[in-house]
Amino acid sequence: MEEIKNLIRKNIAELKPYSSARDEYSGEAMVFLDANENPFNQPYNRYPDPLQRQLKEKIAKIKKVNPENIFLGNGSDEPIDLLNRAFCEPGIDNIISINPTYGMYQVAADINNVEVKKISLNENFDIVADNILNAADKNTKLIFLCSPNNPTGNSLNREEIIKTVKNFNGIVIIDEAYIDFAQSKSLLFEIEEHPNIVILQTFSKAWGMAGIRLGIAFASSEIINVLNKIKYPYNLSILTQKKALELIEKAGDVQEWVKMLVAEREKMAELLNNFHFVEKTFPSDANFLLVKMKNANAVYNYLVEQGIIVRNRSKIHLCNDSLRITIGAANENEILLKALMNFV
Ligand SMILES: *Cc1c(COP(=O)(O)O)cnc(C)c1O
């Protein structure tokens, strides 16, 4: 395993980060006259805490990790982008991603002019560690895994993930956006043993907060420090930080939501399989189902006409003739089923 400090791009390692007024003095005071803030229009006149200490402590307690192992971003999008910027030299380095998977890994790499090597999943939508490791060369800095994977819905084989982590001289990112809906256990505590793992989670799915934009990266403090060094100084507004603290207090609801959605998912999988035009509903550990149809495009267009929008994944590798259907509330799922009954 290569040391993290040797993986960081030279200009980033040598970077002197922006030092804000709140970095230089972060305690209590009688008057703050250091940040050129307007004294009126409280509380929105003040800059937010650049390191989101209060929110991180809350999340650390819930997730049973140390605050120094947490990075908070403007959605998961932010750490995905920052990892490219911290570790991949544009035009030289490359990353590996599985195929099919979440589209943002490719987009973030493309924006940063970083080549993406795509490794096909096998016929069970699973990874084979050796296939991934064999594709890595001396310029491969990041491997993006997604478990449960989007759009296939399945969790990836845990032993193959760990084998990849142990045998790769770079950083393995495991995106667990859907982990709360999964039977399989999170790999979060593997960050203690493996300094080259980054676990991504998000408040956008099980927590029901996609609108406030809050993504989490868990990793060794070495990796977290690099991300903090290059992020925008005030990447999370006080609106997001306050609202997250408020909504986390309702954490009891999250368990209820997850339970209901998982029950709906299992019900929907069974009912969808009854339609003559459905070939297969793939097993899902997430809050959506990938459904293979006889003619996905026709079903998709019909549903749009009915005012029901699902995701057409027909053109995606290994997903031909498949629609990705998010599990909604019981009444929403009912509307979908009723519409499908009238599809001829
Ligand atoms: C939905 C999703 C996310 C969430 O992204 P945010 O920017 O946090 O909203 C992350 N990863 C995957 C695989 C997703 O499907």
Image (cartoon, rainbow, N blue to C red):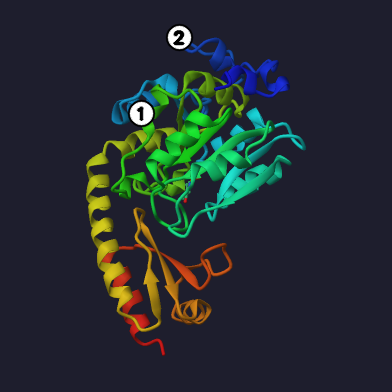
Image-based side of 32 in relation to 58, left or right: right
Q: In which quarter of the image is residue 157?
A: top left
Image-based side of 151 in relation to 256, left or right: right
Q: What element carries label 1?
A: helix
Q: Is mark 2 on a helix, strand or loop?
A: loop
Residue 149 visible in this rendered orientation of the protein: yes
Image-based side of 152 in relation to 227, left or right: left
Residue at x-position 53% and y-position 23%: 223
The one of 298 and 96 positioned closer to us in this rendering: 96
Which numbered circle lies on residue 98?
none
Instruction: Say which amino acid is labelled 1.
Output: Phe
Which numbered circle lies on residue 189?
1
The correct choice, above or below, for 99 with respect to 191 in the image is: below
The one of 81 and 127 positioned closer to us in this rendering: 127
Q: Nearer the viewer, mark 1 or mark 2?
A: 1
N-terminal-most mark, 1 or 2: 2
Residue at x-position 48% and y-position 19%: 221
